[in-house]
């Protein structure tokens, strides 16, 4: 158990809908990362937050947004969902914003868009 | 060309074999390198972390980084059925990690 929690574990929804994925980082970790994992693309970095501020952006679509709250939990919002958004979404956390610290991954949310 | 390339396998070996997993990367700015193991329906878990070039050993696992050839390797000695998983290499700089697509390993008893 990495100490990172994600809810829900599974989510089934329809195209055009909006969903919110939630992540609680390890105790004391200030950085939260969001990743999307699909069979054809592998693990893709979406966005990073550090202590409530956006720190880095990866391959995140404009339909997707995220935020980190004062208690350091983070939410990833996916809107106008398309079939291709079906994937595993992982959250990872680490203590600081530095380069050399390792990330610890949560168990993921499996999203299925029908 | 993707920044981190990894043969997806699958790779099947008998129990006790030495396993070699490899990745190549294209960005010479990458400074730190990691191997993650991911069991089916689970999140990736960190196996090995290496900063810059060189070898690092931890039990049955050895990670190697050759920055001159931009090559990353993970060796597993005396492989066990419990090592069956997908192994993801990752390379990074400036706080951002780029992952390979993962190699699926199966160790047969």
Image (cartoon, coloured by chain):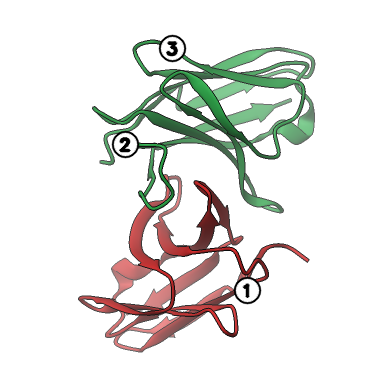
Chain colours: A green, B red
Of residue B54 and residue A13, the one placed in the foreground of this image is B54
Q: What element carries label 2?
A: loop
**Do marks 2 and 3 share a subunit?**
yes
Q: Give residue A95's mark.
A: 2
Kindly report the distance in space between the C-alpha atoms of the residues bearing marks 1 and 2: 31 Å
Identify the residue position indicated by label 1 in the image: B7
Q: Please name the residue shown 45% across and 63% down the image.
A: B32
Q: From what the image shows, is residue B98 above or below residue A74? A: below
Residue in view at x 78 percent, y 19 percent: A15
Please give the residue where the numbered disc 3 appears in the rendered image.
A69
Q: Is mark 3 on a helix, strand or loop?
A: loop
Quadrant for the N terminus of chain A in the image: top left
Q: Name the subunit of mark 1.
A: B
**Label pair 2/3, CB-CB below 8 angstroms:** no
Whether labels 1 and 3 share one chain: no
Q: How crowded is mark 3: few (under 14 residues within 10 Å), some or many (20 or more)?
A: few
């Amino acid at each position: 158990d990495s100490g990172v929690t994600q809810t829900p574990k599974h989510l089934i929804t329809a195209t055009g809908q909006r969903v919110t994925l939630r992540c609680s980082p390890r105790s004391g970790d200030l950085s939260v990362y969001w990743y999307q994992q699909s069979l054809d693309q592998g693990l893709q970095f979406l966005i990073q937050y550090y202590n409530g501020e956006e720190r880095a952006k990866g391959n995140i679509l404009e339909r997707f947004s995220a935020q980190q709250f004062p208690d350091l939990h983070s939410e990833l919002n996916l809107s106008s969902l398309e079939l291709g958004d079906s994937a595993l979404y992982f959250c990872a956390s680490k203590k600081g914003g530095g380069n050399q610290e390792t990330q610890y991954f949560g168990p993921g949310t499996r999203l299925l868009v029908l | 060309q993707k920044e981190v390339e990894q043969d997806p396998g699958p790779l099947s070996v008998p129990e006790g074999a030495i396993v070699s997993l490899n990745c190549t990367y294209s960005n010479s700015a990458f400074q730190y390198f990691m191997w993650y193991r991911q069991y089916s329906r689970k999140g990736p878990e960190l196996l090995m972390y290496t900063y810059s070039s060189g070898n690092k050993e931890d039990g049955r696992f050895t990670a190697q980084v050759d920055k001159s050839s931009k090559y990353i390797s993970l060796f597993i000695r005396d492989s066990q059925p419990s090592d069956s998983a997908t192994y993801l290499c990752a390379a990074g700089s400036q706080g951002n990690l780029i992952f390979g697509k993962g190699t699926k390993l199966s160790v047969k008893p």
